[in-house]
Image (spheres, rainbow, N blue to C red):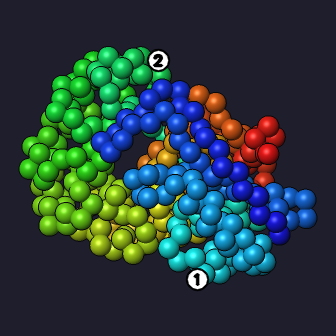
Amino acid sequence: MRLHIFPLNLTLASTFRITHESRDIQPTVIVGLEDNGLIGWGEATAIAYYNQSQDKLVSTLEKNRALIEQTPLDTPAQYWEALHNAMPDCSFELCALDLAAHDLYGKKQGKPVYRIWGLNPEDAPITNYTIGMGPLEEMVSKIENHPWPIYKIKLGSDNDLEHLSALRQKTNSPFRVDANTAWSASETIEKAPILKELGVEFIEQPLPADAWNDHAIVYRESALPIIADESCQTEDDVARCAGHFQGINIKLVKCGGLTPALRMIADARKYGMQVMMGCMTESSIGISAIAQIAPMLDYVDMDGALLLKEDIATGVCIDNGKVYYPDLPGTGASLKSEYRS
């Protein structure tokens, strides 16, 4: 097997702002696993907030090139376990490799990944469209220019309720809000009934990740369900989130790929929690991998490629929130030829 590494920069259609940062360019690393003329594609975006730079991702992959190329790929799960044992603290790199392994395995089987898992793509939930933080005029413009059945609104400013009220005047679509750890427990409990009146379905990660005592209070007293994001990054976090959140949001780069994500979903169901999967700002390679697992989810946020000025890849298509799967094996994704250099 041969490893290909492509560090690329994704240009966003407009500036994307959240509590932690704003950006116009998203660095990413695309990997290809080639065997007998077939290439499986995977992706991991470089996120400064998680101390993941593009150079670090590429360096780790190159350092482990021999291991990656020489480990047999009998199944994606077996491949992930072998790499994880040797690269235990490399979830972003493992994610890219795991997505590529699933894509390659599906191509060898001649089947889409979701079909190998026995899933029906018609069961995939509608994906939201994300409205980043910014001046109210900018947020309103995005709503007006992107009619969508569900919106995810990034909050965390001093004008959250005023902004959300103004956005509600522009659409009847349900809202989901993501405060990205910017609120306190009392603030969350106070705002929740107002948000509910404004048509909000749930609140994602309102408190700092390690504020477990406050998470428990909000879990009991909030008028809206609370979904963990920063508090649920790996498999070990799922059990701790039980009794603190009504659901979890899985990010493939944080947990290490589809292989551990499947286990996280099973664990969350065991504890009676709902399951969401979110994306980074990423190409259709990462988004197409999320689409494979989407039929298992209650909610999905897989609009990352829609936020790009130009997609570097092909794969699943999303129209008005509904995902359409190509009639292709694996994840159905491929890096465009002009970026393979």
Q: Is residue 321 left or right of residue 188?
A: right
Rendered view: 162 above or below 273:
above
Question: Residue 151 location, x and y as percent?
Answer: 39, 33
Query: Callout 2: few (<14), some (14-19), or many (20+) C-alpha neighbours within 10 Å?
Result: few
> What amino acid is labelled 2 in the image?
Asn
Q: Label 1, on which residue?
A: 85
Q: Nearer the viewer, residue 209 or 262?
A: 209
Residue in view at x 35 percent, y 56 percent? 229
Chain-order first, disc 1 or disc 2: 1
| Residue tagged 2 | 145
Relative height, residue 288 to residue 91 (above, below)? above
Q: Foreground: 52 or 168?
A: 52
Left or right, 289 with respect to 17, comes to: right
Q: 326 above or below 269?
A: above
3D distance between C-alphas at marks 1 and 2: 47 Å
Q: In the image, is residue 173 above or below residue 112?
A: above
Which x, y percent locates residue 180? 30, 47
Q: Quick check: 2 left or right of 125?
A: right
Q: Specify whether 47 is left or right of 205.
A: right
Residue 288 position in % (x across, y down): 64, 48
Q: Residues within 10 Å of mark 1 (few under 14, many from 20)?
A: few
Badge 1 marks a residue whose secondary structure is helix
Looking at numbered disc 1 in the image, what kind of residue is underneath it? Asn
Residue at image coords 72%, 56%: 5
